[in-house]
Amino acid sequence: MAPEPPLLTMSGITKSFPGVRALDGVDLHVQAGEVHCLLGQNGAGKSTLIKVLAGAHQPDGGTIAWRGDKVTLRSPIAAMRLGIATIYQELDLVEGLSVAENVFLGHEPTTAGFMVRGRAARTATGALLKRLGHGEIDPARLVGDLSAAQQQIVSMARALSHEVRLIVMDEPSAALDPDEVDNLFRIVADLTADGVAVVHISHRLEEIRRIGDRVTVLKDGRAVAVGLPADSTPTREVIALMTGRNVEYVFPERAEPAATPSGAGPSDAGPSGAGPSGAGLSGAGLSGAGPADVAPPVQPVPPVLAVQGLARDGEFEPLDLELRPGEIVGLAGLVGSGRSEILETIFGARKPTRGRVSLDGRVLRPGSVRAAVRAGIGLAPEERKAQALLMLESVTRNVSVSSLSRFSYGGWVDRGKELRAAREATRELSLRPDNPAVPVRTLSGGNQQKAVLARWLLRGCRVLLLDEPTRGVDVGARAELYTVIRRLADEGLAVLLVSSEVPEVLGLADRVLVLREGRVVHTAPARDLDEHRVLDLVLASAKDGPDGPDLIEGPRGPATTEGGPAS
Amino acid sequence: MTQPASPARPVTEKSPPADGAPSPWRSLLARVDVRTLSLLGVLAVLVVIGGVTEPDAFLDTDNLQLILTQASVIGVVTVGMTFVIISGGIDLSVGAIVALASVWATTVATQEYGFAGILFTAVVVGLGCGLVNGLLIAYGGMVPFIATLAMLASGRGLALEITDGKTQMVTVDGVLKLGERDSYVLGIPPLVLVLAAVTVVGWLLLNRTTFGRRSVAVGGNAEAARLAGIDVRRQRLYLYLLSGLCCGIAAFLLIILSGSGQNTNGNLYELDAIAAAIIGGTLLSGGRGTITGSVLGVLIFTTITNIFALNNLETAVQQIAKGAIIVAAVLVQRRTATA
């Protein structure tokens, strides 16, 4: 309808990474002067799409047209020259440089081509900051001394220091206070009034109502809706678009906690039944895990892990949690809701402000990983490569690193015994290739995760903390990991699971805690929840209260989420 | 619309898998890796060069013995340094610790206690300096570069203070005797024997003990090591203690070799040891390295020095050649790493 061509037309964009098809034919049309919101769950492909737009990734297929002309964005500089500026979620500022130096980094005003005209840069920066409503930020100050919100403003100023026609903002409000969010939105309004287009990525649906003009929804690497009107599309429809799935997740059927292999007796279901050592147990566990039709509210099995009033200021509020052998408890919430922080605090990697963690009734020394490991807690962290794996080492050494004392006599490692134990543990998890001597870096994501699990299995741990266990794991391998996790629980492990993918939490966990902004807002058996309900709880702004807004008439029947063992 | 809830459970039972155990031959081949072979190759080329340019002087038994003897002091230091670098650290104070230990062990007062007194003092001074380094780095949170740089400065200062710049001659017969040209223990020059022993112990420590495993884990990924339940700080402390111990031993060897203690001893050992470890294949970022590689690196440098001396070439040329070798070695390693 517009006589002039749209500012940006991306059509049929595809992009694959090893094992993952991140973008599978995505369209995005942006008009000058509009705020275009990009919505989707974690892993839907938003980040990949904006990286393609920023020139940071090269698409495998599809076309990009800029003001009617076909273009190739070979590099971030090429995108910037066209007038596309991207503000990433992780701020990419140099803390040791001043505000002005950051704003003009890479395109400093110079004399004779190399002498930086510092004063000119500071004056121009001052003007940009004033335009952004933050004239109080001194262009000469070091960026490292500024608050997160001020740094966000500096990022904006940097984007505006170019001749910019399109600004991409990746969750700009995540780190901001409500006042600062208001200011940000005022700036966005000013920019669009000048004809600048904004592509806005946010998890907060109410923000989209406030500033958005149109919405594009991504799901599993595809655009499921392009250019919906932001103000008239019902929230329900948006959520439905985000959650309707093509990818089939296959979850192992869950055993009721009472049906752990060791039987229902409270006395013998304790530590003896919790040892994950016996591979023979697994078969028995699976066959014994028939669909029990009643879920008794009180389990006779005593909890193995008890968390009481655990809190960390600024990260999460006091949390109470009990985990029983054979139980999988899921934590659902957005990035930044405190999920990973909770796991790491239970594990002792972060020191709690208050509260305590106890295993079998024995209180663990707070803030000590070694105490947690010794007591029998294992963590498979979110950033597998950075936090768990020794990438230069073999699978064996990665698996044995936490149990070295078991294979050593006076510090002398019995390598034969080590290899046998590592092989046994990795075989139990069907790790491929079936050769623990290979370097761990050659393994696929799913098998690397298995190596981490094997480490804790070998250690004989009783509580497993899983942070995004299927991140970077391709779809096929996920089902296998789910089976492994469920089997470990059936063998008596207690599992605490964190995942951004709601279906994963619902499909795998017995019980789900929904987190929002560091607070548990809802606890329920997984079978009583469905994806819409959890997303409602997770996405709702704090003012909506624990029950969430009335976006959906009521909780759906359990049959829609849990086809298997429901009564 | 909602998630599919299939009760199907994928069966993961597999038919008996092929045994992944490496055959004895393959593991033997794997042990002598390409890098060690190439270092041996470089050493062989150097021997050929030495044999061609100065056939009589170079291939003389006394000269070959001299090369090994000269390599022993820096070799022992390099073994300790290799551990520190593998763990992701650096020890710039090794030369200063060698100097301090050598002068402290050769004061008139120490020499009254004879052979044992000298040995004991050298080792304890080395351990003491390593303890200070380790505490500052592991528990004081200081960056290894800075902490050991401070130790370098103050260690050298203290050594100068003790000697007042004078050479302290050794008067203990037992020590002097070991330094004589024709003294042998088990048919081997004593210093070479010490280097061999330290190399073997270092190799075992790195490859066969929990200490070695933990050192590699800390260097490869300190956060992962911590989250795996390793006491990273204590491990770091031990590593700098080990480096200090090696310096103490090296100081004793130097006392034997020179029959004296001087505050200028061990000059630039830190750079020689780091260079030897690097060309031996130790990653400066930590997580990977071998003792054999480092000792071969030391032998290569010592042989070069010897060949240049025999050919009456200036030290300036020597230094340039060393620099070129470091660059070449690292470039070759990067090539093979990416291939």
Image: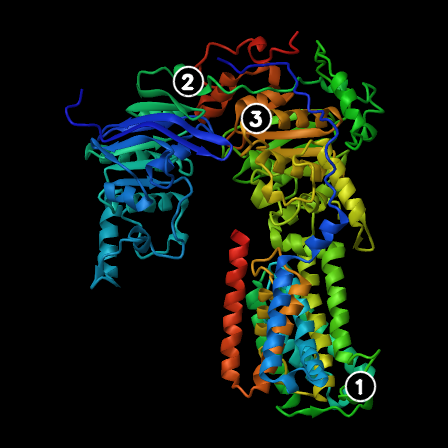
Q: Residues within 10 Å of mark 2 (few under 14, many from 20)?
A: some
Kind of residue indicated by mark 3: Gly
Could you tell me how far apart the alpha carbons at marks 2 and 3 are, in whole angstroms?
23 Å
Q: Give the quadrant of residue A38.
A: top left
Q: Is label 2 in a helix, a strand or a loop?
A: helix
Tell me the mark number nearer the camera, choosing from 3 and 1. 1
Give the residue displayed 69% in from the left and 91% down from the top. Answer: B168
Q: Which mark is residue A241?
A: 2
Chain holding disc 2: A
Q: Which mark is residue A211?
A: none
Quadrant location of the C terminus of chain A in the rendered image: top right
Q: Is label 1 in a helix, a strand or a loop?
A: loop
Q: Are marks 3 and 1 in contact (CB under 8 Å)?
A: no
Chain holding disc 3: A
Instruction: Spot the residue most to the top.
Output: A567
Q: Look at mark 3 in the image and give the residue it sits on.
A: A476
How many numbered marks appear?
3
Could you tell me how far apart the alpha carbons at marks 1 and 2 are, in whole angstroms?
86 Å
Kind of residue indicated by mark 1: Ser
Vertically, is A476 above or below B266? above
- Residue A464 relative to residue A27: left or right: right
Q: Nearer the viewer, residue A74 or A92?
A: A74
Kind of residue indicated by mark 2: Leu
Whether labels 2 and 3 belong to a single chain: the reply is: yes
